[in-house]
Image (spheres, rainbow, N blue to C red):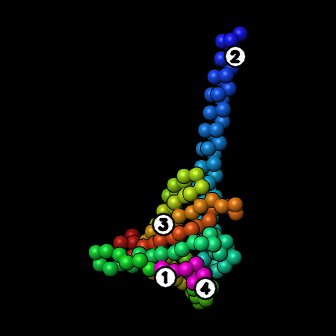
Amino acid sequence: MRNNRLVLGWVFAFSLLLLVGCQSKSQVVSGESDIKNLLTDFFSAMKSKNLRVLQGSFHADAIMNTTLDAGDFATLGNTNVADFISRVETSPSVLDEEILSMAILIDGNMAHAWTPYRFYVDGNFSHCGVNSFQLIRTEMGWKIVHIIDTRNKEGCD
């Protein structure tokens, strides 16, 4: 009888571990899917000038940077989210950022997305580079807290 309880205890513990492991895997997959959707919607909103979706993609304290090529090193350019959204809104051009791939890493409620891109203005190639997104999961879902990018005119093939 004692051995049966011990066996049942081990079976219960093993089943619980399997259940927790499966839930963790599905949460990561769900997190990746949610982040991909957020970023896909973000770039679509930029192209269509959907300011509500653009603004809703960012955390209230988000920051934006770009690397500025200074020869053998880079300097850091800063843009605040409100200025970025204003530039998108007032641009007479169609701004289309084609995402070439998306690599996402998640640790709990924090994520990183690496998105190589090509940028077009009114259908004409402008530049290429990589976006590096930092995101956190909030009560309202995943939000962008930091973007930094590179911008290149060469090596974009």
Q: Name the residue under label 2.
A: 5
Looking at the image, can residue 103 be seen?
A: yes
Q: Mark 4 points at which residue?
A: 86
Q: Earlier in the sequence, mark 3 or mark 1?
A: 1
Q: Name the residue under label 1.
A: 124
Residue at the extreme left of the image, as rendered: 72
Residues at marks 4 and 3, CA–CA distance in whole angstroms: 21 Å
Q: State the quadrant of the C terminus.
A: bottom left
Given contact means CB atoms under 8 Å apart, are the residues at marks 4 and 2 in contact? Answer: no
Regarding mark 1 in the picture, which secondary structure is present there?
strand
Residues at marks 2 and 3, CA–CA distance in whole angstroms: 52 Å
Given contact means CB atoms under 8 Å apart, are the residues at marks 2 and 1 in contact? Answer: no
In percent of the image, x 58 and y 52: which residue is there?
108
Mark 3 surroundings within 10 Å by alpha-carbon count, few (fewer than 14), some (14 through 19), many (20 or more)? some
Looking at the image, can residue 88 be seen?
A: no
Image side of residue 108 versus residue 77, left or right? right
120 shown above or below 104: below
Magenta residue span: 78-85
Q: Which of 30 and 96 is in front in this view?
A: 30
Residue mark closest to the camera, 2 vs 1: 2
Q: Earlier in the sequence, mark 4 or mark 1?
A: 4
Disc 3 residue type (three-letter): Ser
